[in-house]
Image (spheres, rainbow, N blue to C red):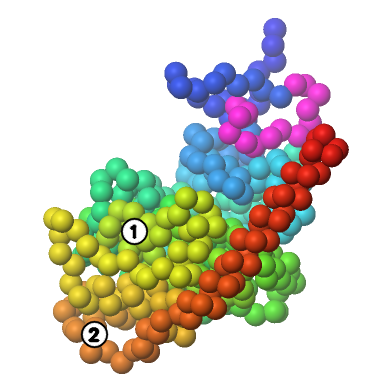
Amino acid sequence: MKEEPPSYMLQEKRDSNDTIHVNPSDGDKRPTTTATDGWSVVPPQYEVLEKVSEGGMGVIYRARHRYTGGQVAIKLLSNELAQDEEALRRFAFEARSVTSLEHPAIIKIRDFGVNECQIPYIIMDWVDGIGMERKIKRDGPMNPEEAVSVVMQTAKALAHAHEHKVIHRDLKPENLMLTRDDAGRTSVRVVDFGIAKALSGKDDLPSQHLTQTGVIIGSPYFMSPEQGLGRPIDARSDIYSLGCVMYFALMGEQPFSGGNCVETIFQHVNDPIPELRSDYRSFPEALQFIVNTAMAKDPDSRYQTMNEFAEDLERFTIGTAVLATAKPVVRKTNAGSNVKVVAMFLASFVLFYLFITILQSVFHF
């Protein structure tokens, strides 16, 4: 008789659209955690209830503590990344960074470590809710009042993170979990600081080990121009990304979307900020001003802190005219200079592609 796997190994459910998965052979001592296998080892004190999602860093499961009954989210690093030293560092840094944060709108990490198969894991609070991206794709754009509330809560949460010398670097709708508070209002939880960066050099793990200048990490749809160009970034990059998230919440689409990553980055760097415009809804001028200020190409022309961003959103909520507020002038980016930078980036990409193609043709690999 075939031996049944331990109870703490997830046996993934399938539907008619799934392919049939088989467990690794008995000779495999280290299971993978990708979407193509049907199970994954978690700490034995937890019972896996379901697979929730899978991203570039790993897989997230909903689980229940066997003794307390409390539900948690368990994030395991994928097997491929678990063998990558850089990914291991980034995963550990996520846990260490977010553990230091105590804010009701930031997901709380309860524990982290390495399981018996040498796969790193993080145990986080479980939130019953829905990601902003999924909600908007399902229900359409948010009304201005709800969108402003969500963005304001997020800005305050990130202000707390920035005060603790941590920036998110990958802020996007899918990293904002939406739920309801006791009064039935939309409440936010910011998740996935997986590519967070320390703003000081006091950490045992220097930030340049995580993301060196010239290396692009993050979602291009919500990426600041400076991050897209591989330049050094600071907390104002998160402000730009949150401005993009606000546009997405109001319009139901990304502000910039090219045919590929390079085209999207080019648009962030060079194209004008799109207007809030709809055939069935009008947007106050003040709301456009807030989006424009958050998404200014030049970091010096944006809100300089998340608190400034949140304060203008609060002014809009209570009906105070934000347009009269003293703000830096939103300057036009030096388009000529940026075109040259992006052109060099594209040229380097093409040369690299040609080099690989030549190698393949010569060595037949």
Q: Residue 185, image x and y in percent?
A: 24, 59
Residue beneath label 2, please? 323
Mark 2: secondary structure: helix
Position of the N terminus, as image quadrant, is: top right
Query: How far apart are the alpha carbons under marks 1 and 2?
Result: 22 Å
Image quarter of residue 85: bottom right
Mark 1: secondary structure: helix
Circle on res. 265: none
Residue pictured at 22% horizontal, 62% vertical: 277
Residue beneath label 1, please? 248
Work out whether 221 lies above or below 34: below
Residue pictured at 15% horizontal, 59% vertical: 281
Secondary structure mostly taken by the magenta-highlighted segment of the chain: loop
Query: Does residue 191 appear to the left or right of 202 in the view shown?
Result: left
Segment colored magenta: 25-38
Count residues near mark 2 (Cα–Cα under 10 Å), then give few for <14, some for 14-19, many for 20+: some
The answer to whether residue 178 is visible is no
Name the kind of residue labelled 2 in the image.
Answer: Leu
State the residue in front, 74 or 257.
257
Please tell me whether residue 18 belongs to the stretch shown in magenta. no
